[in-house]
Image: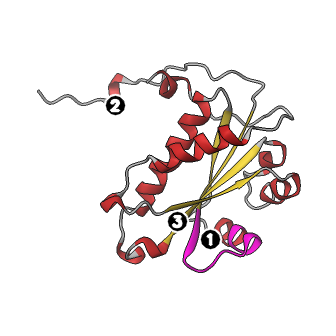
Amino acid sequence: MNTIFKRRSIRKFKNKPIDREILERIVKAGMQAPSAHNRQPWEFLVITDDATKLAVGKMTPYSGMAAHAGAVIITLMNKKTGDFENNLFIQQDMAACTENILLQIAEEGLGGCWIGTYPNENNVKNVKEYFKLPEYIEPFSIVVLGYSFDENKFVDKYDPEKVHWYS
């Protein structure tokens, strides 16, 4: 549980590549997320190419940091994993997947940041067009990661005023 308490959004990275084995562990962590009806609606784009990271950096108003990241992982919703229009929980599935990715990034001693993509129509369109994604694949999140200048440190966010006990 210590990883949960030290995870932070990190936006500045050293110019250092990330080993493929580390990236695979991070994606595997994403795949360990719970999903409604065990649909596992996720797919991933793992990007280490400098030109592509630069392009991702221009896809949303907040993704500029991707250009200098060690890698970028784009989580994708596969709408063929069930009744997408009526699957009220697919966003929760993808959020759990993205959070698992962020926790594994911190566990690996790296920094990372979740950049919202879905449901912003412009962000989704930019990612879909650049990567020529089929209609049944919808980008959900962009996660930038790399070796950080800053250490992941505990910051206490506990607020007892937001906890309501019924005993």
Badge 2, how many Cα within 10 Å: few under 14, some, many 20+? few
> Is residue 121 highlighted in magenta?
no
Number of numbered discs present? Answer: 3
Q: CA distance from mark 1 to mark 2?
A: 33 Å
User: To which residue does mark 3 refer?
Assistant: 77
Q: Earlier in the sequence, mark 1 or mark 2?
A: 1
Q: Amino acid at mark 2?
A: Lys
- Residues in magenta? 127-139
Q: Amino acid at mark 3?
A: Met
Front one among 61 and 133: 133
Disc 1, disc 2: CB below 8 Å? no
Q: Amino acid at mark 1?
A: Glu
Instruction: Measuring from the top left, give residue 88's x and y in whole percent.
Output: 35, 66
- Res 162 label: 2
Residue, far left = 167
Badge 1, how many Cα within 10 Å: few under 14, some, many 20+? few
User: To which residue does mark 1 refer?
Assistant: 121
Residue at the image position 66 percent from the left and 43 percent from the top: 23
Instruction: Measuring from the top left, give residue 134's x and y in whole percent.
Output: 63, 79
**Vertical side of 112 occupied by 130: above or below:** below
